[in-house]
Amino acid sequence: MDVKKEYFELIKSKVNEAYDTQHEQIARIAAMFGECMDNLGVVQLFGVRHGEEFVNELNYRAGGIAPFHAYKFRDLILNKKLEQDKIDSGEVYCDPGIIDRFEELYELDDRDMYCLVSFYGNEPLVTELAKKAKAKGQKVVGIVNKRSYDKVKGTLLDYCDAYLDMCADEPDAALNIDGVRTGQLS
Amino acid sequence: MIDARRFKDELSQLLDHLYDSQKDNLETVAQAMKECIEKEGVIHVFGSGHSVGLGIDIKNRLGSLVPIHIMEMTDFVTKGDITVEEFMDRKNIFERKPGVARKLYDLYDIRPQDIFIVISNSGINGIVIDIADLAKQNGHKVVIITSMKHTLAEEPRHPSGKKLYEFGDIVIDNCGPHGDALLETDGVAKVCSVSSICNNCIAQAIAARTIQLLKADGYELPILNGDEKHDKELKNKYEGRA
């Protein structure tokens, strides 16, 4: 099969798998979001590296719902609370103090809830934010790749009220081109 | 009723249509990327707003191509000499200022063999058109990714009267609906954006095919393989360019 076609077929199969295995959970989490918004809360979104792509899907889109807000490193940089080289070096991802800098910047509310993304469920910043939210009694939804999470014994879901599984492969490289692994599905 | 099943079913149909209608264009882009990489070139990716996700999805991942460079507006602040205040000025929107595209373009180490992928769903915003135009004027191959339904339904806003697709050597239609939202509702607005999903599928498919073509040519693959030493050396090779 043409490798381009192969990729498209894999994506469709994963979309079906995600629906077939989790449509009840999707509905349950949607209800949690709705309840938060009915109460004038905002669903706070955060993911790092490629996790930010999930965040971008919910935040500020055509036909999207307004009360989604994303924690973005870009905001810290543009408000001079973070230097770009800390992102380039990867240093930022291990500094839990970054969460405080976000919280100084944003207008947060006790009625808010959190939707947090981490493929392995072990990103320090994401887990730190989950812990803080849970300690305040706020609802937390985790988005992880369950087979990867279980492999590394991630911890994010310890702080989550619900979660969704990305259903991607572990490792996340679904195509095999003569021994070369590539092609992310997450 | 709007529910996950409806989104899944309509998305699957859209992806089928996208592949069937664009497979030849995807192949042409993969060939262009292969030729660029074999000449030690870099693929520069520029997208407005959420479109930037296309480049992010195929970068810094297991099996991903290293010679991909993402042009970002925040580079004006982090790499250029624009202040945060000027960049964030809501009364004088930065990206609409004349000459902004040239300033962004000049921030980077762009070489004759490089190619450009420019993405915009609507294809009418000034800066994306200016970047595509600059790339063309400088003799680079330009790939456009846009929603033809969306762009053909809009009036041009660029002073040239043109839309982004008119600057492409290769144009890929992401087949997204006008306004990007896929599902009709009973009332107010359509919901569920699909451009990111479509664009990411396009990106992953062409990246995979590019790798396959490079391998067939016996070219040493410039991809991350998870070996720290290998990956660091490869990134150093393209330091300052990607």
Image: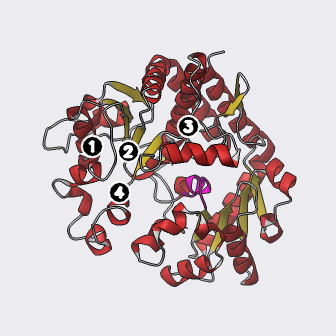
Between the C-alphas of marks 2 and 1, the distance is 8 Å
Q: Amino acid at mark 4?
A: Met
Name the residue located 45 percent from the left edge and 27 percent from the top edge. Answer: B33
Marks 1,4: beta carbons within 8 A: no
Residue position marked by numbered label 3 in the rendering: B65
Q: Quadrant of residue B151?
A: top left
Residue position marked by numbered label 1 in the rendering: B131
Q: Chain of mark 3?
A: B
Q: Can you say whether B169 is above or below A101 in the image?
A: above
Q: Amino acid at mark 1?
A: Ile
Marks 2,1: beta carbons within 8 A: yes
Which quadrant would the N terminus of chain B be assigned to in this image? top right
Q: Amino acid at mark 3?
A: Leu
Same chain assignment for discs 2 and 3: yes
Q: Amino acid at mark 2?
A: Phe
Asked if residue A12 lies left or right of residue B81, the reply is right
Disc number at residue B73?
A: 4
Q: Residue A75 in the image: x percent, y percent? A: 45, 70
Asked if residue B187 lies left or right of residue A117, the reply is left
**Magenta extent:** A48-55
Determine whether the residue tagged by mark 4 lies in a helix, strand or loop. loop
Can residue A51 be seen in the rendering of this structure?
Answer: yes
Between the C-alphas of marks 2 and 3, the distance is 16 Å
Residue position marked by numbered label 2 in the rendering: B46
